Image (cartoon, rainbow, N blue to C red):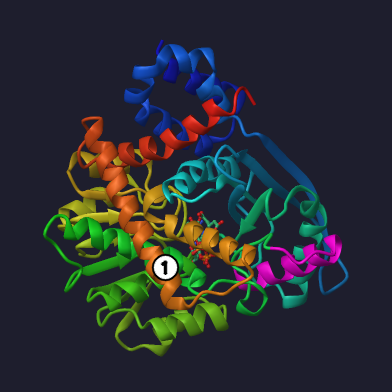
Amino acid sequence: MSYVNEVIDRVIRENPNEPEFHQAVKEVLHSLEPVVAQHEAQFRRDALLERLVNPERQLKFRVPWIDDNGQVHVNTGYRVQFNSAIGPYKGGLRLHPSVNLGIIKFLGFEQIFKNSLTGLPIGGGKGGSDFDPKGKSDREIMAFCQSFMTELFRHIGADTDVPAGDIGTGAREIGFMFGQYKRLRNQFEGVLTGKGLHFGGSLARTEATGYGLLYILDEALKCRGLSLNGKTIAVSGAGNVAIYAIEKAHQLGAKVVTCSDSTGWIYDENGIDVALLKEIKEVRRARLTAYAEARPSAVYHEGRGVWSTKCDIALPCATQNELHLADAELLVKNGVIAVAEGANMPSTEDATNYLLAQQILFLPAKAANAGGVATSALEMSQNSERLHWTFEKVDKKLQEIMVNLYHNIDDAAKKYGFEGNYVVGANIAGFEKVAQAMNAQGIV
Ligand code: NDP
Ligand code: 2IT
C-alpha cells in the first residue's frame, strides 16, 4: 500500500466518527502524492505525514453558563492546536450546535495549509463549542463567552495561539472574550483578532474574507481573459463571508441574485440589497424572511435550493458540504463557469471532483477564503507595532496577498503536471513550506 494510503487508513482507524476530518485529510494527502513520490523514503523515516495529521495538542473542556432564567447549561469547548511549524496557532472559533471534535479537527487541519498559503507566519488551529448563539440575549452570550475564556485563556496568547471569529463568532463575541482574557491575565495583548476598532481591531478585517474571495476570483478570471463585470452570481450564506462577498462582487460589476441561511434562501432578480441584508443580519439578527418582506423583487424559498438558479459563478459561503454532486451537475447544466469557496470545504468530495472533471474554474476554500486569516495576521502585526493602518493600506495588502496566492497555487499545479487544478495546487503549495519548516525543526 502507498505511504499516503497507509496514513489515511490509520487516520480513519484512530479517529472514528470524524467523517469531516477524514474527508479533509484524504483530499490533502491524495493531492500530495506527487510530492510524496519524490521524497518517500525521507518522509516515511521522519513519519512526516503521521506528524502532519496528528494535532500537536487538542483541548476539550466544560463550559458552564447561566441563562436569563437562572438555569445552568453545560456546553463543550474545544481548541485544536494543530501545527505551529511556521508560526503561532491561528484560526477561528466556531459556535454552532453541530460542533464536535471531528469538525474542529477538519477545520484546524485545513487551516495549516491555508495559513501557509497567505505567505504570513501563522500556524494552524481551530476551536469552538456546540453552544448555539441563536436566540440568546446579549447577557447570555456574554456569560457563555466569559466562561469559555475562563478555561481557554491559559492555553492561548499573542505568541502562542491567536483565535478569531468563524460561524457564530463575530465582533460581539470576540469583544466579550477579549475582555475576559484581559481581566484574567491582566495583560492587553493581541490575543484575538477580529477585535473592535477601538481596542486593537484592524480596519478591513470584517470585510476581508468576502473581499479576498472576490480578489482571487477576479485575478483567476483576468488570467483567462474574463471579467466579473456583468456576471450573474449565486451566493449561499448570509453571514460575515457572504455579505462582504456580495458587496465586493457588486463593486466589481457583477450581480448577486441569491443568498441563504439555515432555513431557506432568497432569489432577488434585481440583485441582493447589501444594505438591507446587513441591517437584517448584522443589526437585527433576523431571518431572511425579513429580507423578502422588505423587498418586492425578492422571493423567499424554504429549505435548500440556492444552486438551482441560473448563474455564471457560484460562491458557497455558508458551511461544509453544502454543495452536493447534484447541485454541481445542475450548476454546470445551467452554464456555470466558476465556483469559488468562501466557506470551509463547502463542496462535497464528489461535487469537487465533478467540477474539476468538467474543467470549471474551481478555487478551493483554503486558497479562496484565506483573505480572512491573512488580514487577521495583519491585525497581529498592527498590534505588535501598536499602530493602526488605514483601510486602504490593509485592503491593498489583502489584494496583493490574494493575487500572489493565486499565482502560487497556479505555479504549483503546473509544476506537478496538474495545470488548472487548484485543489492540487493549493495543497502542494501550502504543504511545501510547512514540511520544510517541520524538517528544519527536527522531530517535535
Ligand atoms: P456566520 O455565522 O457569519 O454566517 C454563517 C452563515 O451560514 C449564516 O447565514 C448561517 O445561517 C449559514 N449556515 C451556517 N451553518 C449552516 C448550516 N449547517 N446549514 C445552512 N446554513 C448554515 O459565519 P461566517 O460567514 O463567518 O462563516 C461562513 C463560512 O466561512 C464557514 O464555513 C466558515 O468556516 C468560513 N470562513 C469564515 C471566515 C471568517 O473570517 N469569518 C474566514 C474563512 C472561512 P444561520 O444564520 O441560519 O445559521
Ligand atoms: O476559517 C478561517 O480562516 C477563519 N475562520 C478565520 C481565522 C482567523 O484567524 O482569522
Query: x%, y% of residue 168?
Result: 59, 64
Residue drawn where x is 35% and y is 61% of the image: 400
Q: Quadrant of residue 15?
A: top right
In this picture, residue 311 sits left or right of residue 196: left
Query: x%, y% of residue 284?
Result: 57, 83
Q: Quadrant of the N terminus?
A: top left
In this picture, residue 148 sits left or right of residue 384: right
User: Of helix, strand and loop, which one carries label 1?
Assistant: helix
In this picture, residue 252 sits left or right of residue 185: left
Task: Identify residue type, mark 1.
Answer: Ala
Name the residue beneath numbered marker 1: 242
Query: In the displayed structure, would residue 391 be above or below residue 182?
Result: below
Q: Residue furthest left?
A: 225
Query: In the displayed structure, would residue 40 be above or below residue 394?
Result: above
The magenta stretch is 170-189
CA neighbours of label 1 inside 10 A, class few (<14), some (14 to 19), many (20+):
many
Residue drawn where x is 21% and y is 42% of the image: 420
Query: x%, y% of residue 185?
Result: 84, 60
